[in-house]
Image (cartoon, rainbow, N blue to C red):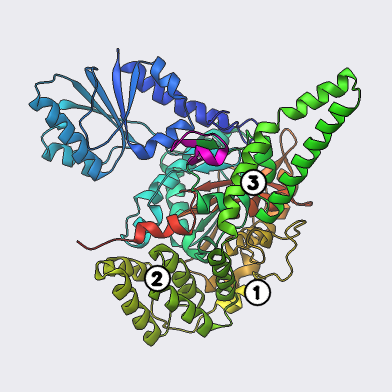
């Protein structure tokens, strides 16, 4: 099954964006004549697999290698480095070129920066005395469709860069990616932003529109009606909770990377000792599309039903005389057997994690923390985890959740837990705790918390959630409605204005902008612009692009898809994100060891 997702059902023409990126890469390869060795930054490898088949790169004379610390083994006289603008990669390239020179190898070297070159990287190449041996270019890959309604800007560290290091480069990249979208689909008339980084992205985007205007008349009627920008910092609670949708759990336990999970082949029923298998997960797999956003409890029932019905059909086939058309129907059903088997295997493997008492205990504790009514119980649970030396990231997930819902911990508790963490995990983790404090994730309490007010006003904790027939987004966490998606729900329904008081309690400013270059549609209330825009020219629903600056979880994507599918919803939703994250991948960049 294709790793490259099928984008035919996307609400806008994402295929054209992917084709453009593919064309730009192949043009780079065509312009370097003859055979060449293409050394790819390992972090880029997965992204490229969603754009272009490796066989196509080979057809254009490229011999593929992952860039590592080892010298490149190739007979090619041309080496093309395709890399992110990272300082450590510049050192790696320099040492490889020097290694070649010391062996007397004569090669031509090309460095293509993704998505753009930076002065600081070129400076390092100069200092390493290899700059004059290089031809330098850019491969402007700013965004990548990873499914028919999800676009990623592939910015791994955007959240930490911004919060801890004060580096806003990633915000420029996000704005550039959005500007690129506008040049294809028209100027987005309405922008709502919440959070420091999001407001900054909206600013940069407006500045880009002034400096390099997208001509409204060229692009015609804008295909995207509204852009909602949301900082991860506005809602740190959601990604720290354990996701309970099928795709969310696959990411929590197995790690979904570039639309695939890698598992031991034995899990998928293939007996090959120690071999790993990549299992693609995107809308091309019809069954996955049907079950990906369901609560995991329900997925197990759905798979059981499908397997039972297949078994009954088989029994009927063998015991009664069938007409040719009945045979044909049965064979058609058999085609879905590999998909059913694949997901039964994955679900069975997930059950080994979800049935563990440690996982169920952690779920209970997350709910207790989010309900914010039993401070001492939560404090003692976290203290016990530290003393048992449970994995540091697991401890930090609950600790940060606890700290945020209480707007920090009282000084005595804060100092005590900090000291215990360093005793248990080593004093080299002082840098980790400083990073978390700087980002406001684990800190001393300065004012009384407002989480309980927010939770009640937005109805974030929902009792008796029906996960099988959900009527609210809270089904994705079995009783907790993601704060981020509640905000999106309100922003779509009635704009920021009715939420004014709640928005003030959340981090960062909130802004609303009506942009020129498009006439029509009042801005005070989106629903009146529904009347003006009602449907895009060919009868499709209007589009809202929701962008998460700092990452989004699969559970939040599931909640947005659920919103979009509700009766009376006048919009299709597309999700943009710096990266797909979960609690673990969100915290890992903050974990540093001194020395």
Is 216 in front, or is 60? 60
Marked residue nearer the N-terminal end (1 or 2): 2
Q: Which residue is mark 2?
A: 440
Is 560 in front, or is 289? 289
Residue 535 sits inside the magenta stretch: no
Marked residue nearer the N-terminal end (2 or 3): 3
Question: For the point 38% across and 49% down, which residue is it?
Answer: 170
Quadrant hosting residue 72:
top left
**Distance (Cα) linking label 3 and label 1:** 30 Å
Quadrant hosting residue 305:
top right
Q: Which residue is mark 3?
A: 292
Q: Which residue is mark 1?
A: 457
**Distance (Cα) linking label 2 and label 3:** 33 Å
Q: Which mark is residue 137?
A: none
Q: Nearer the viewer, mark 3 or mark 1?
A: 3
Labelled pair 2, 3 in contact (Cβ < 8 Å): no
- Taking the image as drawn, is residue 191 in sight? no
Q: Residue furthest bottom?
A: 412
């Amino acid at each position: 099954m294709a790793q490259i997702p099928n984008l035919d059902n996307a609400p806008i023409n994402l295929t054209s964006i992917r084709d453009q990126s593919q064309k730009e890469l192949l043009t780079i390869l065509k312009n370097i004549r003859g055979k060449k060795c293409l050394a790819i930054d390992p972090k880029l490898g997965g992204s490229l697999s969603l754009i272009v088949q490796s066989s196509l790169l080979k057809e254009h004379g490229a011999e593929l290698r992952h860039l590592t610390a080892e010298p490149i083994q190739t007979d090619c006289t041309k080496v093309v480095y395709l890399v992110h603008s990272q300082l450590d990669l510049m050192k790696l390239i320099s040492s490889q070129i020097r290694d070649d020179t010391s062996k007397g190898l004569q090669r031509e070297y090309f460095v293509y920066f993704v998505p753009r070159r930076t002065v600081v990287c070129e400076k390092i190449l100069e200092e390493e005395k290899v700059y004059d041996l290089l031809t330098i270019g850019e491969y402007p890959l700013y965004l990548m469709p990873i499914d028919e309604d999800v676009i990623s800007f592939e910015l791994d560290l955007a959240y930490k860069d911004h919060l801890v290091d004060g580096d806003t480069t990633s915000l420029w990249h996000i704005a550039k990616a959005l500007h690129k979208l506008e040049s294809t689909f028209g100027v987005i008339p309405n922008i709502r932003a919440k959070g420091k980084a999001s407001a900054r992205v909206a600013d940069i985007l407006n500045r880009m529109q002034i400096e390099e205007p997208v001509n409204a008349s060229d692009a015609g009627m804008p295909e995207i009606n509204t852009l909602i920008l949301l900082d991860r910092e506005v809602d740190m609670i959601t990604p720290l909770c354990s996701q309970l949708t099928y795709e969310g759990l696959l990411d929590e336990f197995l790690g979904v990377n570039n639309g695939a999970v890698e598992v031991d082949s034995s899990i998928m029923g293939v007996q090959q000792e120690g071999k790993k298998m990549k299992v693609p997960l995107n809308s091309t797999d019809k069954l996955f599309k049907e079950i990906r956003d369901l609560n995991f409890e329900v997925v197990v029932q759905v798979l059981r039903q499908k397997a039972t019905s297949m078994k009954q059909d088989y029994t009927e086939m063998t015991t009664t005389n069938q007409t040719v058309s009945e045979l044909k129907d049965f064979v058609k059903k058999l085609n879905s057997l590999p998909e059913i088997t694949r997901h039964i295997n994955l679900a069975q493997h997930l059950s080994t994690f979800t049935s563990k008492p440690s996982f169920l205990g952690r779920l209970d504790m997350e709910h207790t923390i989010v309900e914010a009514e039993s401070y001492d119980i939560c404090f003692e649970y976290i203290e016990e985890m530290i003393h048992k030396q449970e994995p540091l990231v697991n401890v930090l997930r609950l600790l940060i959740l606890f700290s945020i819902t209480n707007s920090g911990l009282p000084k005595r508790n804060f100092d005590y837990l900090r000291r215990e963490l360093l005793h248990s995990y080593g004093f080299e983790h002082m840098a980790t705790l400083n990073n978390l404090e700087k980002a406001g994730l684990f800190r001393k309490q300065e004012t009384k918390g407002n989480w309980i007010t927010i939770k009640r006003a937005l109805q974030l904790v929902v009792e008796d959630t029906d996960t099988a027939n959900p009527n609210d987004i809270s089904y994705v966490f079995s009783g907790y409605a993601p704060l981020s998606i509640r905000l999106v729900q309100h922003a779509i329904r009635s704009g920021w204005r009715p939420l004014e008081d709640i928005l003030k309690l959340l981090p960062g400013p909130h802004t609303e902008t009506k942009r020129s270059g498009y006439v029509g549609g009042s801005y005070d209330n989106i629903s009146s612009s529904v009347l003006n825009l009602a449907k895009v020219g060919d009868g499709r629903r209007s589009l809202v692009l929701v962008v998460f600056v700092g990452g989004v979880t699969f559970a939040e994507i599931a909640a947005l898809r659920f919103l979009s599918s509700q009766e009376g919803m006048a919009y299709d939703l597309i999700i943009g994100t710096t990266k797909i994250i979960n609690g673990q991948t969100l915290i890992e960049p903050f974990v540093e060891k001194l020395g």
